[in-house]
Every structure is written in C-alpha cells, then in structure tokens.
Image (spheres, rainbow, N blue to C red):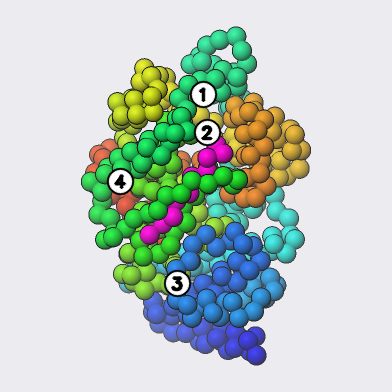
Amino acid sequence: MRLTVTILALATLAACSTATPDPATLDPIANRYVVLALQMGHHDPGYVDAWYGPDSLKAIADADTVPLERIGAVADSLLGLLDGPVPAYADSLVVMRHRYLRAQLGALRAKARMLAGERFTFDDEAEALYGVRPPELADAHFDSLLARLDSLLPGDAPLDVRYQAFRATVEIPSELVDTVFKTAIAACRARTAAMMPLPPGERFDLEYVTGTSWNGYNWYQGGYRSLIQVNLDFPISVDRAIDLACHEGYPGHHVYNASLEQNLVQGRGWVEMTVYPLFSPQSLIAEGTANYGVDIAFPGDSRTAFERDTLFPLAGIDPALAERNAAVRDVMVALNHARNEVARRYLDGRIDSAEAVDAMARYWLQSPDQGAKTLRFIDQYRSYVINYNLGRDLAEQWVVREGGDSEEGRWAAFRQLLSTPRLPGDLVERD
C-alpha cells in the first residue's frame, strides 16, 4: 500500500514537471526528500545531523523501515523530475533551490549505495557526497611545510616531539577551560553581531563531554537554538578555544543553521532546510564557512592580539608566546590537508591502520594516542575530512572573490553563504 502511494505521488510530481516552471512544483519533491533523508537515518544513525521539521513528515518516515534499495529508487525518480536544464524561474533563489535539491538527492542516492555495500574510492566518494573532487598533494608539499615549522621550533629532538612540547606550553589548565572558552565565545559573538544581524532569541547551550571521535559538535535544535558539546579528551590550547567558539558558534555552525532557518524555513517555507543530512554537499558549505569564520571574525592580526591580551593571561599562560603560537598555527592550518592524504591512502587500502597513525605523526605531528583518535574519526566519517580544509579554502576564495578587499564586503559575501542554498561547485573559480 505504501509503495502504491509513493508511485502515485511520483506520478503527480511528474505531471507537475511538464507545466510552466512554478516554484510550488518543488514543494512535493522537497517533502519527499525530507522523508527519504529521515528514512536513511534508520540505516545510519549518524546520517541526520539536525532535524526540526513537521511532525507529519517524521511520522511518515517512522512508519516502517524502508529498504535501502527502495530509498535509492525513489531518489532516482525524484532526480528524474529535476533532471535537465534548470527551469528559468523568475527568482534566482528558486533556481538555487532546484539545484540544491538535485545535489542533495544525488548525495543521498550515493550514500544509500554505500550503505548497501558498494565501495567507492576516496575521491569518488568525496565527489559523490560533497560535490567536489579533492586535489591530491604530494609528500614534497607537506615536507616544505614541515621545514617551515622546523625553523619556528628549533631544537635537537624530532619535530613532532618539539611541536607537542610547544603545544603543551599553550594548553589551558583544565580548571580554566570553561572560563577561557566562554570568554572566547563572548568575543566571537560580539564580533559577529557587529557585522550581521542575528535571529531574535538565538542562543546555545554548552556541554563538556568525553569519549567521542570529534573535538566539538553543534547539535542544532531549531528555533534558533543549538547544543554545543566540547570533547575534553583532546587538550584545549588557547587558540583552540577561539577555533571551537567560532566554528561551532559564532559565526560558524550555530549562525549558519539559524540563518538558514530564518531566511529559508521561516522566510520561504522551504521544508528541505529543516533536515541536515551530514553526508551531503551541505556539509562542505557548513564546515568550510565554520572554519573560515575564524578569519572573518578576527581579520588580520586581531586574533593574535586578542589571544595575547585577553586569553593568554586568563589561562595563566605567558603572553609572549602568542606570536610564535600564531605562526605555528598558520603552518598547521596548511598541514590540515595531510589528513586528506592519510585518509585517501588508508581508505583506499594503500596503507594499514598502523601506517596511518605513523603518517599522522609525520605529517600532522600527532602523538600515537592522538593519531589513533584521528583514525577513529576517519573510520567513522571517511571522506568527510575534506570539508574542513578544502571547504575552508573554497569558502575563503569565494568570499574574497565576491567581497573584495574590504571587511564589510567580505562579511556581506559571507552572509550570503550562510543564508542561501549554494553548492560547493558554486565556490570553485571557473576559468
């Protein structure tokens, strides 16, 4: 009976698609996409990252467990309705909506195939799920970065030992983590609110956790509310407090999700934005803007100055370390791409788990324990790692290209990324 209803619904949608282009014809597709995404969550508990939509659609999704083959078949049918040139909608946002639904459904279909046992290479998986093909960087690229880091951390010990020793000098004492972190959050929020209006009543709750494979996580609740969790299994350095505060909060995930809700759910009634499938093109935009959001909130040398003058003293750490810490951090941001290379070689079967941990020690200067935790993340999230580094780079390139040299212009471009259904391919500069 349910299969009959689905076929009838798809037939109705097909009839709609032959008419004059009308934004309303996308609503039934959006509803079905939401149900499919929620049904995928029955097969992979980590698939749905956020959901705050209508109870009626949740009830349909929860009525039974739909096999992966049927989910893939319905996704194929919906993609057929969206195939071909995008209609000439009068509203440019509706053009984006059409393309967004098509891209998200394509990723959903690919994830269904993966869960059913089909194997993808790292690059094919990244392209199928996140809409971009990550570049492959040679070891020589990372060696040049390590040489730069070596000059910043002189000594006779191996570089990874020197790096870990230096990072220990800027680690926040456990009893001061909450104070430093909340101070960082307040600064990130103030800088964000000064450059863009925040939704009314927005806020988030903060929790400290252990035993996860990630450093921090934003669980968006809807109604402009988030739950942000910080994993205390990982050491939190002074600059990591700013990273997490901006990435998870302002102007990162919390502001991104709240902006989409305000502009597209409340403002347009687009139900598809009430569900966030983690393994989808949306994640490259979400993670990319969250990581680049640190640079937007603290342009130029302002981050180093804030850390030196406020956070270092608050954490009881010598402020004289701030400048060198910033220089080390810049190299490590570039070395973040090493995670992609390790993940590619490991997931494609070119290296085993022990070799992957060794590679993380060599190219990301992690201790064996930290490398093992990173490998846990790669095992769980696979090619998702590209969203943090490649996503950040693409977000920065697009914002600079669209916003120009002024801080106001870049904030205006950044706000567009936070509040519209742009796709990863939109961020790539075309020749």
On the image, the x and y values in percent for residue 152 come to: 48, 16
The reply to whether residue 220 is visible in this rendering is yes
- Residue with the mark numbered 4: 189
Name the amino acid, label 2: Pro
Total marks placed: 4
Comes first in the chain, label 3 or label 1: 3
- On screen, 16 above or below 224? below
Name the amino acid, label 4: Arg
Q: CA distance from mark 4 to mark 1?
A: 28 Å
Comes first in the chain, label 4 or label 2: 4
User: Do the numbered discs 2 and 1 sit on residues whose CB atoms are within 8 Å?
Assistant: yes
User: Do the numbered discs 3 and 4 sit on residues whose CB atoms are within 8 Å?
Assistant: no
- Residue with the mark numbered 1: 168
- On screen, 383 above or below 334? below
Between circles 4 and 2, the one closer to the viewer is: 2
Between circles 2 and 3, the one closer to the viewer is: 2
Is the residue marked by circle 3 packed among few (<14), some (14-19), or many (20+) residues within 10 Å? Answer: some
The reply to whether residue 363 is visible in this rendering is no
Is the residue marked by circle 2 packed among few (<14), some (14-19), or many (20+) residues within 10 Å? Answer: some
Q: Which quadrant of the figure has residue 197?
A: bottom left
Name the amino acid, label 1: Ala
- Residue with the mark numbered 3: 53
Tell me the quadrant of the picture where the N terminus can be found: bottom right
State yes or no: residue 356 in magenta: no
- On screen, 42 above or below 294? below
Instruction: Please name the residue shown 30% across and 46% down the image.
Output: 189
| Magenta range | 225-234
Comes first in the chain, label 3 or label 4: 3
Q: CA distance from mark 4 to mark 2?
A: 23 Å
